[in-house]
C-alpha cells in the first residue's frame, strides 16, 4: 500500500460535487487516511504551487486556489499515485477518459475539479503540507 495526496478544488466544492468525488474515490478503492475542509490562504497557495512560480499561469492558479474552500485528503491504495492520476483523468476535461473525475466534474483545464500528486515523493511532501502525523488514521 502507498499514499497519495488529493485536493478537491474550490470549483468542485462550490458546485456541490465534493461528496460525489469522495464517493467516486472510495468506489475506486482508495482508503481515506485524512480529510478536511480548508480555506487555503494566498500565502499557502503560493508556497504549495511554488514549483510553478515561473510559469505564466502561476498568478491565476494562486488566485483560484485561494478563492474558496477546498477539501484536502490523504489517500491510501496499491500504487496510489498512479491509480489516483488514472482516476482523475487528464488535466483538460475535454481530453479526459469517460468516467474519470475530471470528465464528470471539471469545468475547464484551469478549473479542473481536483489535484493529484505526480510522484510518491511529492505525495509525501503534499500530505505533510496539510496534515500533521496525528491527523492521519491507519
Image (spheres, rainbow, N blue to C red):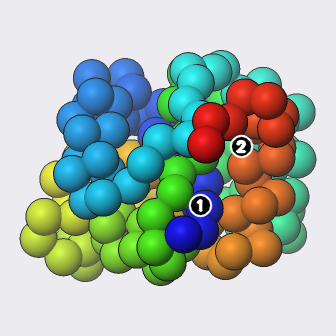
> In this image, 5 relative to 16: left or right?
right
> In this image, 110 relative to 123: left or right?
left
Quadrant into which the N terminus falls: bottom right
Camera-nearest residue between 4 and 8? 4
**In the picture shown, does residue 85 fall above or below 21?**
below
**Does the rendering let one see residue 17?**
yes
- Name the residue carrying label 2: 62
Point 37% across, 22% down: residue? 14
**In the picture shown, does residue 129 fall above or below 4?**
above
| Among the two numbered marks 1 and 2 on one chain, the one whose residue lies closer to the N terminus | 1
Q: Quadrant of residue 120?
A: bottom right
Dot 2 falls on a residue whose secondary structure is helix
**Residue most toward the front?**
138
The image position of residue 59, as x and y in percent, is: 74, 49
The image position of residue 66, as x and y in percent, is: 67, 30
Q: Nearer the viewer, mark 1 or mark 2?
A: 1
- Name the residue carrying label 1: 4
Point 65% across, 20% down: residue? 39
Camera-nearest residue between 30 and 69? 30
**Does the rendering let one see residue 65?**
no
The image position of residue 61, as x and y in percent, is: 64, 49
**In the picture shown, does residue 72 fall above or below 58?**
above
Dot 1 falls on a residue whose secondary structure is strand
**In the picture shown, does residue 53 fall above or below 26?**
below
Neighbor class of circle 1 (other Cα within 10 Å; few <14, some 14-19, many 20+) is many
Amino acid at each position: 500500500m502507498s499514499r497519495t495526496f488529493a485536493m478537491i478544488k474550490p470549483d468542485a466544492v462550490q458546485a456541490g460535487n465534493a461528496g460525489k468525488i469522495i464517493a467516486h474515490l472510495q468506489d475506486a478503492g482508495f482508503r481515506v487516511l485524512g480529510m478536511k475542509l480548508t480555506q487555503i490562504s494566498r500565502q499557502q497557495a503560493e508556497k504549495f504551487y511554488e514549483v510553478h512560480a515561473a510559469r505564466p499561469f502561476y498568478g491565476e492558479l494562486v488566485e483560484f486556489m485561494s478563492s474558496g474552500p477546498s477539501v484536502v485528503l490523504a489517500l491510501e491504495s496499491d500504487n496510489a499515485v498512479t491509480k489516483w492520476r488514472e482516476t482523475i483523468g487528464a488535466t483538460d476535461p475535454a481530453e479526459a477518459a469517460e468516467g474519470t473525475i475530471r470528465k464528470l466534474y471539471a469545468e475547464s483545464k484551469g478549473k479542473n475539479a481536483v489535484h493529484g500528486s505526480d510522484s510518491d515523493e511529492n505525495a509525501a511532501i503534499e500530505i505533510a503540507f496539510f496534515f500533521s502525523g496525528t491527523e492521519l488514521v491507519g
